[in-house]
Image: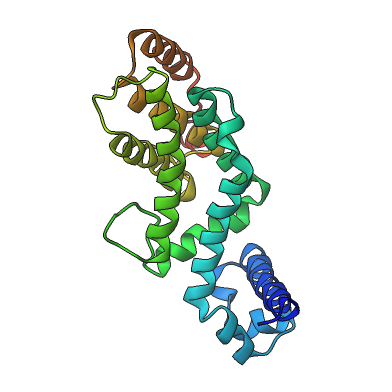
Amino acid sequence: MSSKREQSIAERKARILEAARTIIARDGYDALTTRGIAEAAGVTAPTLYNLVGDKTAIISAMATASVEELWGRLHLDERGSPLAMADAILDEAYAQIMANRELNRANLIALERLGIAYAYHPARDDPGAHAARRSVEMVQYTCREAQRLGQLRGNLDAQLLAEQMFAAYRAPLDDWLHDAIDASEMLRRQRIGFYTVLAADASEEFREELLARIAKLAASQTVHPKMEKEAA
């Protein structure tokens, strides 16, 4: 395959995914059809199927691309400290969601409706599990670096810690997705979750720093505007 052909395929794939993002962000999951995506991307329906696949494959590709994009921006080895790495993972993921919140909300809802869970499971090989594994790898890198520096004692395996940190990330994301909390509260809860898991295996000095951060975050809980209105 020539480089020109490879470039052409990559460009058409990118157009297909961008068309899908535009449609789902503007009109929601129900408006997303392979015919509509093909027309918006300027390709034929057979080309769309050959390059990406059906609607499920397109939604899955969007989710995978989102996680890989986050990996590409993180540069964890340049963050200076494990705690800065952990914060960067949360902050960059939050920035990515907020950059196009309607698209990301619609995409996550679409995954649910298609039965593709963005959840960690080592034995599953679907796109949701792949994206989750990549997310766990980001946090595991952070935990291993903290162990290397003695900030984590190593009594708990880095993989186990990373899985629990991912779970602490996912629960507030689900609450935000279903409009139970706002975005800032989602990030606050995710950060508390990360720090709490790290504190379970932290050295005494690192644990004190984590507990101080948790206490500060615990004092800054926000109330969803919708809940405030209902309470009034």
Query: Is the N terminus in the top left, top right, bottom left or bottom right quadrant?
Result: bottom right
Query: Can the viewer see residue 190?
Result: yes
Q: Quarter-wise, where is residue 172 in the image?
A: top left
Q: Position of residue 208 (x, y in %)?
A: 39, 9
Q: Residue at x 41, y 52 (%)?
A: 132
Residue, far front: 2
Vertical comparison of 107 with 217: above or below: below
Q: Residue at x 58, y 75 (%)?
A: 32
Q: Position of residue 86 (x, y in %)?
A: 49, 30
Residue, far left: 155
Q: Residue at x 48, y 50 (%)?
A: 177
Q: Relative to 112, is 43 on the left or the right?
A: right
Q: Residue at x 29, y 54 (%)?
A: 121
Q: Position of residue 71 (x, y in %)?
A: 56, 47
Q: Quarter-wise, where is residue 163 in the image?
A: top left
Q: Position of residue 28 (x, y in %)?
A: 58, 67
